[in-house]
């Protein structure tokens, strides 16, 4: 059995489609959609900036949850900020959070995705019985970390996507934590990105009133990803055809990321591909939930990646996270994409982001005046 957590667009019509999909497939089920408020509660932060996700009020959310529940699909509220500016340790901050938890509970929220251990503890000590899922930004990369979250009362964990191809570690995490271990399938982040944890902090603050939003990390990420064509293969995505290998080691929970894609993408088409374990087309379209993220697009033939995952399964320690000494992904990209076209597009992308680098330009301009 495969269970999926997918982004909410907060439309009843979408819930109807997901309900039909659940009815169509016996071995795959959408168990929840996830998202957050944008008209209130943004001061508590989340993993996505409010201006990049569907607009939703408390009354809208309550109606959505009520309808979803009728269709046997839960809702998970993303309270996965990585920084609350230490407000969770102040009397004022604690009161604000408890009031907010009460508001969420009253409109039907029973499941929360949380990143901060301090906020997990606050929720567990409150009078409201929420189920807590540890966010991927908790950086759960080994059985010890997984077990620590289990011991403090977390019901489900989302494993850090950096180990999606480390089958030995994933199996160890599954054994240590238990059944409810969840993996993100449509990973679009650069592997071992130096900006990752800081990018999450930046996005957490983007929701806080008075904080300036910035493109610094998203642009740096794009520039790093554009350095080599093979970086696209190194992203730790899970193809629909490869999900069976994860089920084979006891992992049955999967997450489709893309709250920002819920407005203009096609979440239904994406999740159906994973239900059917079959997709014929551009892998990057699938990973982006069929929404355009920028003007610098590439084409990777998903079907030509057949058996790409096998060495990671069969050979213990196959990936040593030392790409400079390995050419497996470099060889792979040549058989599933036009490397020359990718290099040309990457060059244009790097020029664009470098010329549009407001942070760098500001530093250089201010430096002139010193």
Image (tube, rainbow, N blue to C red):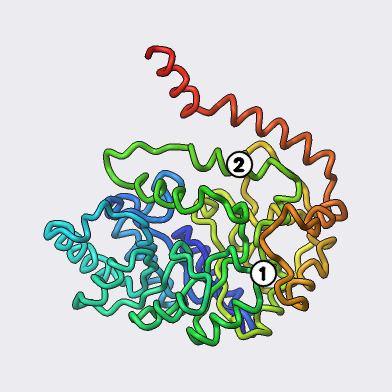
On the rendered structure, is 56 left or right of 282?
left
Question: Label 2: few (<14), some or many (≥20) within 10 Å?
Answer: some
- The quarter of the rendered structure image containing the N terminus is bottom right
Mark nearer the N terminus (2 vs 1) = 1
- The quarter of the rendered structure image containing the C terminus is top left
Exactly how many numbered labels are in the figure? 2
Residue at the image point whose x is 40% and y is 78% from the top: 148
Residue 250: quarter of image: bottom right
Residue at the image point whose x is 59% and y is 55% from the top: 192
Position of residue 141 measured from the top left corner of the image (x, y, whole percent):
53, 70
On the rendered structure, is 326 left or right of 29?
right
Position of residue 39 measured from the top left corner of the image (x, y, whole percent):
30, 50
The residue wearing badge 1 is: 165
> From mark 2 to mark 1, how far is it between C-alphas?
22 Å
- On screen, residue 115 above or below 206: below
Question: Label 1: few (<14), some or many (≥20) within 10 Å?
Answer: many
On the rendered structure, is 239 left or right of 202?
right
Residue 2: quarter of image: bottom right
- On screen, residue 14 above or below 336: below
The residue wearing badge 2 is: 222
Q: Is residue 248 visible?
A: yes
- On screen, residue 301 above or below 179: above
Residue 27: quarter of image: bottom right
- On screen, residue 172 above or below 56: below
Q: Nearer the viewer, mark 2 or mark 1?
A: 1
Q: Is residue 23 visible?
A: no
Element carrying mark 2 = helix
């Amino acid at each position: 059995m495969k269970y999926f957590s997918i982004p909410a667009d907060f439309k009843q019509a979408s819930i109807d489609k997901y309900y039909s999909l659940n009815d169509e497939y016996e071995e795959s089920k959408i168990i929840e959609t996830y998202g957050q408020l944008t008209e209130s509660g943004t001061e508590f932060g989340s993993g996505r900036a409010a201006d990049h996700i569907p607009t939703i009020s408390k009354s809208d959310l309550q109606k959505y949850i009520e309808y979803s529940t009728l269709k046997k699909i839960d809702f998970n509220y993303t309270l996965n900020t990585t920084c609350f500016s230490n407000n969770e340790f102040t009397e004022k901050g604690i009161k604000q959070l408890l009031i907010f938890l009460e508001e969420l509970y009253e409109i039907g929220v029973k499941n929360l995705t949380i990143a901060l251990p301090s906020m997990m503890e606050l929720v567990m000590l409150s009078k409201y019985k929420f189920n807590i899922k540890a966010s991927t930004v908790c950086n759960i990369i080994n059985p010890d970390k997984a077990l620590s979250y289990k011991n403090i009362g977390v019901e489900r964990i989302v494993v850090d996507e950096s180990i999606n191809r480390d089958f030995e570690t994933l199996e160890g995490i599954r054994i240590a934590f238990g059944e409810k271990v969840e993996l993100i399938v449509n990973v679009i982040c650069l592997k071992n990105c130096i900006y990752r944890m800081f990018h999450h902090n930046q996005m957490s603050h983007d929701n806080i009133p008075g904080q300036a939003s910035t493109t610094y990390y998203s642009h740096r990420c794009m520039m790093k990803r554009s350095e080599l064509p093979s970086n696209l293969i190194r992203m730790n995505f899970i193809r629909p055809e490869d999900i069976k290998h994860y089920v084979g080691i006891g992992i049955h929970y999967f997450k489709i990321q893309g709250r920002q894609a819920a407005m203009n993408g096609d979440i239904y088409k994406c999740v159906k591909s994973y239900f059917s374990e079959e997709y014929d087309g551009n892998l990057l379209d699938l990973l982006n939930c069929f929404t355009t993220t920028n003007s610098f697009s590439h084409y990777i033939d998903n079907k030509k990646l057949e058996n790409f995952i096998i060495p990671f399964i069969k050979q213990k320690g196959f990936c040593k996270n030392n790409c400079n000494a390995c050419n497996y992904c470099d060889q792979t990209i040549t058989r599933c994409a036009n490397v020359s076209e990718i290099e040309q597009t990457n060059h244009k992308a790097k020029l664009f982001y470098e010329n549009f680098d407001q942070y760098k330009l500001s530093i250089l301009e201010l430096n002139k005046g010193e």
